[in-house]
Amino acid sequence: MSDNPYIVSEEEKYFFDLRGYLIFRDILSQAEIDACNAAIDANADKIIAPRGQGNLTRGATALEGKRGRHEMWELIGLPSPHREPFRDLLVHPLVVSRLNEFSGKGFRLDHGPALIESIEGDEGHWLHASGEPFNPAVSYHQQNGKIYARGITVAWQLTDVNAGDGGFACVPGSHKTAEPTPDDLREMVDDMGLVYQPEMKAGDVLFFCETMTHGTLPWKGKGKRRSILYKYASRAANRAVGKHFTPQERYGDWVNELTPAQQAVLYGPGMHQGEKTVVMPTLESDGKEVTVTEGPLKLFG
Amino acid sequence: MSNPLYTVSEEEKYFFDLRGYLIIRNALSDADLAQCNATIDHYADQIQTRSIGNGGLSRGSTALKGQEGRRELTGMLGWPTPHREPFRKLLVHPVVVSRLNEFSGQGFRLDHGPLLISAHKGAEGHSLHGAGEPFGQSVAYHQQNGKIYCRGITVAWQLTDVNPGDGGFACVPGSHKTAEPTPEGVRSAEDDMGLVYQPTMKAGDVLFFAETMTHGTLPWTSDGERRSVLYKYASRAAARAVGKHFTPQERYGDWVHELTPEQQAVLYGPGVHHGNRLPFLESDGQTVTVSEKK
């Protein structure tokens, strides 16, 4: 790795291309870690389990726990001075240099930041994503010495993650697989020795390619898990749909004149709403006419 | 190709994957065709002719130069009724929906357009653009396990005939998959290496092409007018043009003024056609700075 934490080295590019993630050690000062943790403590009432228990395990018994995942959103909108540490992280020099290299200049915050917090016994998260089926929102490509990662999540660690603690886990290299992921691996019934849980210290920062298979193991650490996730996208990619999504929001009320089929192709870009699948009208052509189907977006299934 | 008009055949998928474009013949009825042309005639005084100054769209190529610029007309979907109806109909024509569901995936969307491209005899061409190298994130092409993932497809309805040697749309078949840089002689058509192809089309045909395939326009040499209406579609997660809600203020509200210029820079909306409105960030090892908009 580079001696200078702000310069992207050839070794870093090799590691990220091969494994799909990259960890930088000791990036935040103790004062910065303390400021982030204090801001969270001061707003602890905003930490919630938005999906309840069992939603993220998808029935995988190996990932079950006593409590659902706890999150806090809108960190950059907290009252001052609590928001400032999270606004600083948004464009931290280390992030800018890596994302300029891996996603290209003009990268953008797609959604987040969000705190993920766990206490001992919290459930895990089903392992999701991979190179197959190909996902246009977050796909990974390397060509002629240049990396094109459409979706990168940057996860700042505010507490230690020791060996066996659980938390973030991934299948290194899976961002480039063209074979389907076995269900038993996704559910951790048989991980085939492929699932890796990295050890990290408070102040480390993890970059991972969203198309790499990843998820969460149940938290076994004695202390709290606290990780702040910023979800970035390359310039032409869209992951979450954002506010201006419906035809009316994008173009104005005149679109009400259009047929439902015509309106269906005027929605904004994006694949999900937060963590939820997009519900929107999609079109079918039966050979004679176009019909509209309303429901969760079916992509390449 | 054994293509029933509305069904995507295996032969069509093979052809599109291999060549980067596909032409469906006789997709428009004579009545639809006549209505589109009559409507454009009605708005003929609003057609704008592009300047050929500063190299024009031919970018100084001797092979692409002409005596006048290409002619353009936009705004069809918002015209007063009944003039807008034929173009709204084309927006979700059954031929389009079936192909885009297959090639770009369900939930495909109109990214920008429609745009009429018209030309009179002697109009200049357009420098060839697009290619698999460098990799274009907004319109990239990928095929995997029998499935095509094409982020940007332009659908060009032909309202007049294009005969051999007429000029107009031209492309380098297969170039959507190249990983080698395109020679300048091909882009300018001054030395096209025998690779540039100008398809013959009839009024009523519709051309689908992958935006990342190298394509452009040859000078128009026909006595008849060229008329092609282009709808620019994108797959669900791709953004080509930035659209209306682009700046941090437009997307999130005025509270973003509290943020530094560097923080605001990562809150712009998606899209690569931003008209030099996007600030880029640099990290020099100590601090993050905003570079010139480009």
Image (cartoon, coloured by chain):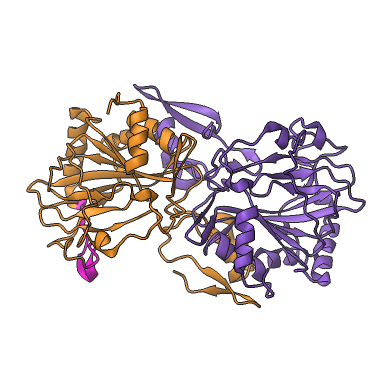
Chain colours: A purple, B orange
Question: Residue drawn at (20%, 56%), measured in percent from left and top?
Answer: B70
User: In the rendered view of the protein, which quadrant contains the C terminus of chain A?
Assistant: top right
Question: Residue drawn at (42%, 50%), measured in percent from left and top?
Answer: B139
Residue A45, horizontal then vertical, whole percent? 84, 51
User: In the rendered view of the protein, which quadrant contains the N terminus of chain A?
Assistant: bottom right
Question: Residue drawn at (82%, 56%), measured in percent from left and top?
Answer: A43
Counting every numbered tag in the picture gives: 0
Q: Is residue A29 left or right of residue A240?
A: right
Secondary structure character of the magenta stretch overall = loop
A30 or A192, which lies in front? A192
Residue A164, horizontal then vertical, whole percent? 86, 49
Q: Quadrant of residue B86?
A: top left
Q: Residue furthest front?
A: A193
B96 or B186, which lies in front? B186
Question: Residue B42, relative to residue B11: is it above or below?
Answer: below
Q: Is residue A198 left or right of residue B258?
A: right
Residue A211 visible (yes or no): no
Q: Specify start and end residues of the magenta stretch as a single range.
A: B46-60
A153 or A259, which lies in front? A153
Q: Is residue A120 left or right of residue B215?
A: right
Q: Residue furthest left?
A: B223
Residue B249 visible (yes or no): yes
Residue B117, horizontal then vertical, whole percent? 23, 49
Q: Quadrant of residue B36?
A: top left
Give yes or no for residue A263 being in the magenta stretch.
no
